[in-house]
Amino acid sequence: MSAATTKTALIEEGHWLTVRDCKRVLVLVHTMTFAQRLKEVFNLLEGDLRIQVVFTAPPHAFGNGVTHYLRSLGITPVPWEEALRADFDLALTAGSRGVHELRAPVVRISHGAGHNKLLTDRSLLAPGETRWPGMLSRQHLLHDGRVVPAAVVYAHERSLKELARSCPEALPVARVAGDPCVDRILAAAPNRQRYRDALGLAAGERLVVVSSTWGPASAFGRIDALLPQLLGQLPAGYRVALLLHPNVFAGHGTWQVHSWLAGCGGRGVAVVPPEVDWQSLLISADWVIGDHGSLSAYGTLTDATMLLTSGPQREIAAYSPAALLAAAAPVVSPLHPLAAQLQYAAQTRRHGQYERVAASLSSAPGQFHQRMRALVYELLGLGEPARPVVVPPLPQPSPLAEWELSVNQEWLGRAVGA
């Protein structure tokens, strides 16, 4: 049977299928970031012969690499146009683009830590209308005045209060389930030394993780100011790992990102591929230098000392994790040696300095997967499996040396060709 025939069979439930009479769930994977978050949900359906899961990759500016990533998981996505013509019992998405066209009840989940960034497209706003983050904005939840999702899943009870102000029409479908990244980091934190060993960190070596979201105000958008400090001001015994938002790779291409970072060759700087599970890197870090992105906020759950690059304060939602962190963490200055700033931040760190930030990430720690499974099965009209939810542990990371540009050129060639 050809791949095209297989896709059509999955969509039409024709006579080609072996397991029939299934509830059909469509997973919309717009970007790599969405894929990684949605994986926490569709994996909850594993082993249930009552459910057929179908994947599609709708058009998106940052969609590069999605199909390759899905195929690496053994998934063949169906064309978006075919998905729009078919009926499904449920659709799972971490974005809003195109979901109003689906013939299925939609579950919308968040794809980051809280709701940090305000709506960027001001043209969508009426004169004098307040800018809200995407998951709280009318522009992302309504279409022609109608609430599109059958359920909108938030990490924190606080979001319901904000939703009552921003889009009260969506309150009846709002649910609070917690945050899967919070749960994974807290559960895996006791394995810190094991992850450090897997990364190849020797006794006494210190790991500095630099995390960056995407966009001109991100740490990578200003990498020309930070890179000289990383390359020229850290003494022996410091290792550096760059955790870049997948949209950086999708927007510019892997070759271009590595080309810009060519000066890192031979300096012990690891550029972590976008498909890698990043939580173990944060857990292993001694310091995290971040921006207003989600990974900086998640870093507050670890033992790492936090430092921030200067960020776009007017683009950040008040009381978001990013805003709370900006008020609590020291800021890196280009005018002073980086090693001295790292030491100063560690020495002056106060007990509970990031406690408020960490608490803002989830009001249901440890409960995301159980609550999410219950919601999905409720909307499908099925009883849950008679077994506890099993969340696989974080995978062991590869050695940092495999991601250092100058050490393994064969790996670099594969990454560029991906």
Image (cartoon, grey):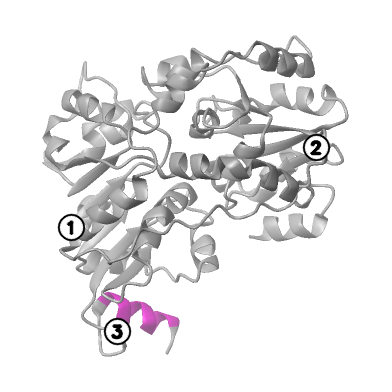
Q: Earlier in the sequence, mark 2 or mark 1?
A: 2
Say which of 357 and 128 sits in front.
357
Q: Which residue is mark 2?
A: 264
Q: Residues within 10 Å of mark 3 (few under 14, many from 20)?
A: few
Residue 149 visible within the image: no
Say which of 157 and 55 sits in front.
157
| Relative vertical location of residue 338 with respect to residue 180 in this rendering, above or below | above
| Relative vertical location of residue 88 with respect to residue 214 in this rendering, above or below | below
Amino acid type, callout 1: Leu
Q: Which residue is mark 3?
A: 19
Provide the residue span drawn in magenta. Answer: 3-11
- Percent position (x, y) of residue 301? 52, 31
Residue 92 is drawn in which quadrant?
Answer: bottom left
Q: Earlier in the sequence, mark 1 or mark 3?
A: 3
* SS type, badge 3: loop
In the picture provided, is 62 more to the left or to the right than 163? right
Say which of 143 and 35 sits in front.
35
Residue for point 55% across, 31% down = 299
> Is residue 8 highlighted in magenta?
yes
Residue 3 visible within the image: yes
Q: Residues within 10 Å of mark 1 (few under 14, many from 20)?
A: some
Residue for point 31% across, 81% down = 9
Mark 2 vs mark 1: in front: 1
